[in-house]
Amino acid sequence: IHFVTSELDCGPIISQGVVPIFDNDTADDIAARVLKVEHRLFPQAVADFAAGRLKIEGNRVINSRNQPEDRPLLA
């Protein structure tokens, strides 16, 4: 899940998941797995955006839900 920019699939990433890729997979097999992960991640990404927890710094998204208030962000 990412913010949209003028470049295809190049916006700052809000959330991402992992799907397995098998030797005999078709593009449709992979797309179906990706869609399941997107459906799981999307509601939280929207909730974080609506709550104002997302901040774009350069090409990175900082989510305050994932960062304790008193601890500096280490990258």
Image (cartoon, helix red, strand yellow):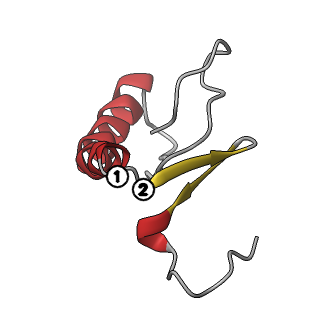
Q: Earlier in the sequence, mark 1 or mark 2?
A: 1
For residue 59, which quarter of the picture?
Answer: top right
Query: Crowdedness of circle 2 by 10 Å Cα count: few (<14), some, many (20+)?
Result: some
Q: Which mark is residue 48?
A: 1
| Nearer to the camera, 5 or 36 | 5
**Would you place residue 41 above or below residue 25 in this image?**
below
Badge 1 element: helix
Q: Tell me the distance, in whole angstroms, between the alpha carbons under discs 1 and 2.
A: 5 Å
Q: Would you name the residue on which mark 2 appears? A: 53
- Which residue is nearer to you in this view: 17 or 14? 14
Q: Residue furthest bottom?
A: 70
Q: Taking the image as drawn, is residue 18 in sight?
A: no
Residue 22, image x and y in percent? 47, 47
Q: Residues within 10 Å of mark 1 (few under 14, many from 20)?
A: some
Q: Amino acid at mark 2?
A: Arg
Q: Is residue 11 above or below residue 1?
A: above
Q: Is residue 19 above or below residue 71?
A: above
Question: In the image, what residue occupies the spot 45% across and 37% down?
Answer: 24
Q: Position of residue 70 (x, y in %)?
A: 57, 87
Residue 44, horizontal then vertical, whole percent: 28, 52
Asked if the residues shown at circle 1 and circle 2 are in contact, with their CB atoms under 8 angstroms apart, the answer is: yes
Provide residue 71's location: percent of width, then percent of height.
Answer: 61, 86
Left or right: 10, with 43 as reference point: right
Give the quadrant of the C terminus. Answer: bottom right
Q: Nearer the viewer, residue 28 or 5?
A: 5
Viewer can see residue 75? yes
Identity, as a three-letter code, of the amino acid under mark 1: Asp
